[in-house]
Image (cartoon, rainbow, N blue to C red):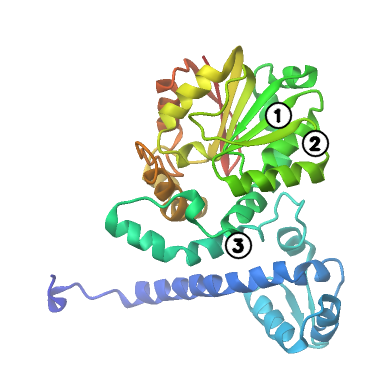
Amino acid sequence: MTDIATRTAPDEQKMNAFVGRMLGDMGAAFSGALILIGDRLGLYRAMAGAGPIGPQQLALRTHTHERYVREWLNAMAASGYVEFDPATGKYTLPPEQAAVFADGDSPMFMAGAYDIVAALYRDEPKVTAAFQSGKGVGWHEHHQCLFSGTERFFRPGYNQHLVAEWLPALDGVVEKLERGARVADVGCGHGASTTIMAKAFPRSTFWGYDYHEASVAKARENAQKAGVADRATFEVADARSFPVKGYDLVTFFDCLHDMGDPVGAARHVRETLARDGTWMVVEPMAGDHVQDNLNPIGRIYYSASTMLCTPASLSQDVGLALGAQAGQERLLDVIRQGGFSKVRVAASTPFNMVIEARP
């Protein structure tokens, strides 16, 4: 071990700046639990559009206790999540923050992501043990709040981009869907992407597949609520064994990198497609080199990949462990190894890339 006496003394100015940054990070970490409380108890929703409101009034609206609500509001104000008026003692949720915290249909909604954050902390002992053993931690082994949080985190982006931008970026796919196509949505989770497509294209038939039985049950429930159960069905199956039906379109939303054998999954997709079928792969946005991803989005994705994606892949056969920041070059290579010769990035957002693959 390095002798402490021989270590280079830290630059005091740089150290103070870094400590200040860490205090900000610590405040964000502490605030995460309060965001969960505000989301689950409807505190943000009660404040949205209400104008200035006091703790007692908010407590009455949400059937909560005023003393807890007052402390929560002060924490929100200290974080800049709500505004505080010292003259009146009241708090306001601005419309910009309301879009992030209170409106589940807003493309900027982020409160749902904190269910994922909760799962990371709950399951930290499992991942710590995996660091030491080298074994994986399966998706199904995580706390159930991960599954609902994943749906709530990704659904706003899918609502905004899937039908309006991503599908139209694929060659001839929208026309097929409008006429009536056969679609497999693999790794569908709670079925957010499946139901969005089924609502938009009533003449098409959709099958959602996921290996996690509890998620499939929830997807069926969500499809029933959305009024699309007549054309969107869900089955338990993994990416290397889902039924062959001659699909016009197969979709993988934010899941290829989680798979132990993504090349094997690609080969199976190739076998299930109709002759002129299309495979759409939506993956997290990432550059091809580590230095390309050292930014706020990369920070989130690398952290999630360490706790969720890489352990999930390592728990399966092959265990390729692409990670959530695999990058375009690596992903396209995997898809080509699966037997696809026509591969391109058809669309992108700051958070996602959309890959079109054809045999």
- Which residue is at a point 71% across and 42% down the rendered structure image? 220
Q: CA distance from mark 2 to mark 3?
A: 28 Å
- For residue 206, the mark is 1
Secondary structure state at the residue bearing disc 3: helix
User: Do tag 2 and tag 3 residues touch (Cβ < 8 Å)?
Assistant: no
Q: Is residue 295 above or below residue 179?
A: below
- Which residue is at a point 41% across and 43% down the rendered structure image? 313
Amino acid type at image mark 2: Val
Figure quadrant of the N terminus? bottom left
Q: Nearer the observer, disc 3 or disc 1?
A: 1
Residue 36: percent from left, percent from top: 65, 68
User: Do tag 3 and tag 1 residues touch (Cβ < 8 Å)?
Assistant: no
Of pointers 3 and 1, the one earlier in the residue sequence: 3
Of pointers 2 and 3, the one earlier in the residue sequence: 3
Which residue occupies the foreground of this view, 296 or 313?
313
- For residue 114, the mark is 3
User: Do tag 1 and tag 2 residues touch (Cβ < 8 Å)?
Assistant: yes
List the residue tagged with mark 2: 228
Amino acid type at image mark 3: Tyr
